[in-house]
Image (tube, rainbow, N blue to C red):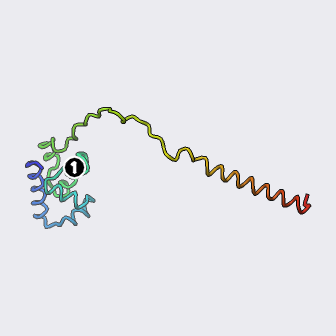
Amino acid sequence: MSNEAKTIGDTFKQRRQELSLSLKEVENATSIRMNYLRSIEDGEMEKLISPVYAYGFVRQYAAFLGIDGEKLIQSHPHLFRPPKPQEFSYGIGTLEIRGNPTAGVKWFPSAVWILVTFAVGALAWWTARSLDLF
């Protein structure tokens, strides 16, 4: 948590309290979940889903409170910048294709149904032959 994020959060919290609004009322009006609103007010932007969501939530929350959200975001762009992508190193086992332990028996249910169908047909033929129906 940075001091800048905490300052932004305090600004939102103070403005919300000036307007005598609860977090629940803000949640209902903005459709931003209360836990995200609380994270913004506490200056814990890292608890939001991603920097893109933080950007959108802050803009929307600021607009609702009558604060210039764009100015806040432009003055603290590093709070809303996505983290640098981590390098992925290919090591042993990262590209292995793992077999499915049950892959060898996928044919079994089909084979059982084919055998059952054949057996029922043979039994019907034998019964009809025994009763001289042909």
Q: Which residue is drawn at 52% across and 47% down?
A: 102
Q: Residue at x 17, y 46 (%)?
A: 70
Which amino acid, by three-letter code, is at mark 1?
Answer: Ala
Front residue of this view, candidates 55 and 96:
96
Q: In which quarter of the image is residue 116?
A: bottom right
Please state the horizontal and vertical placement of residue 88, each as a whole percent of the image: 29, 34
Label 1 crowd (10 A; few <14 / some 14-19 / many >=20): many
106 sits left or right of 22 in the view: right
**From what the image shows, is residue 71 above or below residue 123?**
above
97 sits left or right of 10 in the view: right
Number of numbered callouts drawn: 1
Q: Residue at x 74, y 52 (%)?
A: 118
**From what the image shows, is residue 12 above or below residue 86?**
below
Please state the horizontal and vertical placement of residue 32, each as a whole percent of the image: 25, 58
Front residue of this view, candidates 46 and 33:
46
Please state the horizontal and vertical placement of residue 13, each as a whole percent of the image: 12, 60
Q: Which residue is tagged 1? A: 54
Please state the horizontal and vertical placement of residue 44, each as a whole percent of the image: 16, 53
Q: Residue at x 11, y 43 (%)?
A: 75
